[in-house]
Amino acid sequence: MEKRNTKTVSKLVLMVVGMFCFAFALVPLYDLLCDITGLNGKTGDRAYKYDAAILTPDKSRLIKVNFITNTNADMPWEFYSEKGGVRVHPGELKEVVFHVKNTTSRTMVAQAVPSVSPSVAAQYFHKTECFCFTQQQLKPGEELDMPMRFIIGPEIPGNIETVSLSYALFDITELAARGSLPSGQAG
Amino acid sequence: MNAVLESSHDAHHHGPVNTGLKRWLFTTNHKDIGTLYLWFSFSMFLIGGVLALIIRTELFQPGLQFIEPEFFNQMTTNHGLIMVFGAIMPAFVGLANWMVPLMVGAPDMALPRMNNLSFWILPFAFTMIISTLFMPGGGPNFGWTFYAPLSTTYAPDSVTFFIFAVHIMGASSIMGSINIIATILNMRAPGMTLMKMPLFVWTWLITAYLLLAVMPVLAGVVTMMLFDIHFGTSFFNAAGGGDPVMFQHIFWFFGHPEVYIMILPAFGVVSQIIPTFARKRLFGYDSMVYATSSIAFLSFIVWAHHMFTVGMPLAGQLFFMYATMIIAVPTGVKVFNWVSTMWQGSMTFETPMLFSIAFVILFTIGGFSGLMLAITPADYQYHDTYFVVAHFHYVLVPGALFSIIAAVYYWLPKWCGRMYDESLGKIHFWLSFIGVNVTFFPQHFSGLAGMPRRVPDYAMQFADFNMISSVGAFLFGFSQVFFLYVIIKAIKSGQPASDRVWEGAHGLEWTIASPAPYHTFTEPPVFDDSEVHS
């Protein structure tokens, strides 16, 4: 009896330890799932590599891309895009400039977090350059123009005519000071 | 069977080793620990009930009368936490402690010392949770689902106490489950094969596995919160590369099995009681076991139906909608079996039976509103309204809680050797039955009309429904104080109960003396088919 109980208990404890680890394994699994499905409108955290020679714009389609900028919670910076929206052909490289200004009297670090809606479009929204890949450290009153270049993949489903790209600007001065952030971690 | 009776008579003279407080602190006896769990959960039930009445008092009329919105949020949060983790779950563990060894013919739980530990850490967890209400900044105010960033970035300082309390009660549940599984798998009386086990034992076996699968995930998610709050990680912080939506996915991966953890043992309880008072064998025993197992399996693949409105691909919405609806099939099998058990039975309507029949009817109503919520497009309207509140209170109060009350009436004569007063029991039943429906039925309507959850104030058009709800809540609340009186009266001055207690009762627990001797089944009993009833 004693022996059988020990055996049962060790199996069950193993199951508990396994499930505790599984909870943490869900974090990378979730990121992977988001990468594959574009869940939550995540657009990836690295610059898109492309070959201009083979990428030909699909002149038959025109997609409207809206830009939405907002600052999170108490973040006091100015943050806006030069254009509210642009029309692009799938496969065409486009550049939009975003503008930030540190309106405070102290040096701050910011991180922009993008999100694409509808979320299925996220996997076709390729950025070759984006300020969201890095953090922005601005001195008091400093301003910055930040270009963002993107291509919408020609394979984007035909029913998508409008794509909205939203950026939320977060104040990460404290997180950055703690040194607990690898640069450009934000997806 | 004579051998059993004699051996338990011998054992009768060996009471607890210690007396007084020491007896309860150091006890490793499954009956003592079961009693401790039951009284603990009853006291938590009363505390959680007081919080509920504070909520209903504020909602009696529109406008802010008695409490601040900030305090109201602490009331809803702590009501949920205390009722789920402090009242319902420990009550079922208490029933398991008392009844599983008696039902399988084991002398005690497999790991008696761990059993003591798993109970005695619980009071610490709940003292911690309740003490946060008196701390500067207040207690948890982010809802019992503690969604990040409400529970991380915007949480009161006391959130750390909440996290450790969740760790402790998780540890308690895990140890309790390991104990129950080991007892059931290794200590059954000779002749009791798995498919001859009473259904209460079956449902607890499956529940225990569910607990072992998801409590570590809950521990994981609160650990991530702890890291986000104190160690600068960004699991759920978008600024640092995390994702608050991921919190909801991990939480509900725990949370959905959790709601079945609270209802499967209830299925087991009514599957014991209905055959007794219908004087028939349980209809479709095998299908009950398979239905319970399928419900347990399905509970792992439906979590995202709690978060349709958070946004997910169409394929995901369809999958979670259909998967959720499939659960209605095994649940329907169970309801069908209970009704068929009663069909043409020689039914009598003692208090446990009344609560069980009410369970079948009212739980089914809660199940139907669940089906409505499962429909993704409809859920966009129902989400976060009082319709959801009505739904889960219908499955938890006249569902889980009624089954616990039924179990107490059913087994109390075996525990203390005395019968409760049948008339008082019936009065308690009718007060509870009316109270619960007056409280929660109008919430369906206010929810469909658009009243949001977790608000201390509401628009004028919801005033009537809320007033009815509050009246019902006070009726229900006070009838549970009456329940306490009925129990104490039974323990102190009830009529002596016979060993079999109920005419139609079958099972090993009824072969021992009433009250159950301190040590039972020190020699394994002979289990023959005459005691198989469910």
Image (cartoon, coloured by chain):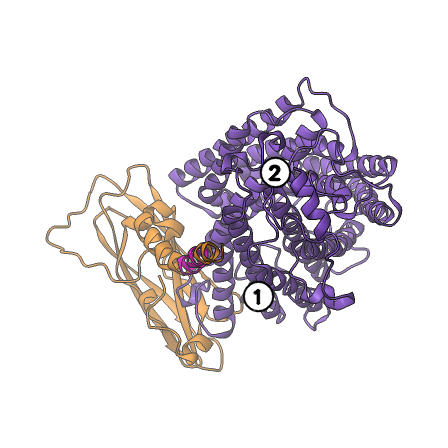
Residue B274 in the figure: left or right of residue B21: left
Q: Which residue is mark 2?
A: B268
Q: For this view, does B198 lie left or right of residue A62?
A: right
Q: Chain of mark 1?
A: B
Q: Secondary structure at mark 2?
A: helix
State the image coordinates of residue A94 (x, y, percent, origin top left): 25, 56
Regarding residue B343, the answer to whether it shows in the image is: yes
A114 in the magenta segment: no
Q: Colour of chain B?
A: purple
Residue B163 circle label: 1
Task: Look at the image and give the residue range highlighted in magenta.
Answer: A10-23
**B20 and A14: which one is in front?**
B20
Residue B259 rendering spot, x and y as whole percentages = 57, 45
Which one is nearer the viewer's eye here, B364 or B241?
B364
Q: How many marks?
A: 2
Residue A18 position within the rendered picture, expressed as x and y whole percent measured from the top left: 40, 58
- Magenta stretch encompasses residue A22: yes
Chain letter, disc 2 residue: B
Nearest to N terminus: mark 1 or mark 2? 1
Q: Residue at the left extreme?
A: A53
Camera-side residue of B57 and B438: B438
Amino acid of disc 1: Ile
Q: Give residue B111's mark.
A: none
Dot 1 falls on a residue whose secondary structure is helix
- Report the amino acid beneath label 2: Gly
Which residue reaches farthest right? B493
Note the chain letter of the orange one: A
Q: Can the viewer see residue B403? A: no
Give the crowd class for mark 1: few <14, some 14-19, many >=20 residues within 10 Å.
Answer: many
Q: State the image coordinates of residue A46 (x, y, percent, origin top left).
A: 27, 62
